[in-house]
Image (cartoon, helix red, strand yellow):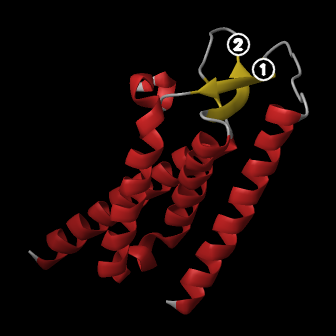
Amino acid sequence: MKKELKIATTIFIVVFIIDQIVKYGFANLGWDMNGDYMSLKLAYNYGVAFSMFSFLAEYLKYIQLLMVFAGTVYLFMNKDVFKEYYIPIALLYAGGLSNILDRFTYEGVVDYFYWHYGFEFAIFNIADVMINIAVAIIIYKQIKQSREEKKEKAKNN
């Protein structure tokens, strides 16, 4: 368990710091750039994905902190879940807490990747990408585990 915690902590720190440095650059140093396919353009998201729940902007940071706290309590009580999913958990926490810090620092999440070739897509950031990668890893592991359990069950019948 110590090994997994060290790896998760390292992943968390690296992802969190990189994300915050890049966001600082966009929010304070004018790193905007326009491209043919994708632009790097500062935007603040006062809601969650696709600006949903933006009417809760001033409360979202507290709601999200409460959710992180609840998740941490769950993981503390279910150490086997952490041991199985420590890498996606580290990515999820790094991305989630970085976005929450933005809400306290900038009053909204700092977004900057803007895809606009062929179709317009939401503006997002590194933290959002890490959260999506974490969810994809969890789903992949769940599907793989389910298939293995079905094979084992069929083998025993």
What residue is drawn where x is 87% and y is 16%? 34
Q: Nearer the viewer, residue 138 or 107?
A: 107
Disc marking residue 153: none
Instruction: In the displayed orientation, state which residue is furthest to the left.
Output: 157
The image shows a total of numbered marks equal to: 2
* Horizontal relation, residue 156 to residue 125: left or right: left
Q: Which amino acid does label 2 sit on?
A: His
Q: In which quarter of the image is residue 144?
A: bottom left
Residue 15 appears in view: yes
Badge 1 element: strand
Instruction: In the displayed orientation, state which residue is furthest to the top.
Output: 118
Asked if labels 2 and 1 touch by Cβ distance under 8 angstroms, the answer is yes
From the top left corner, tell me how far across and down residue 63 is, in percent: 38, 46
Q: Earlier in the sequence, mark 1 or mark 2?
A: 1
What residue is drawn where x is 89% and y is 21%? 33
Q: Mark 1 points at which residue?
A: 38
Q: Mark 2 points at which residue?
A: 116
From the top left corner, tell me how far across and down residue 1 is, in percent: 49, 89
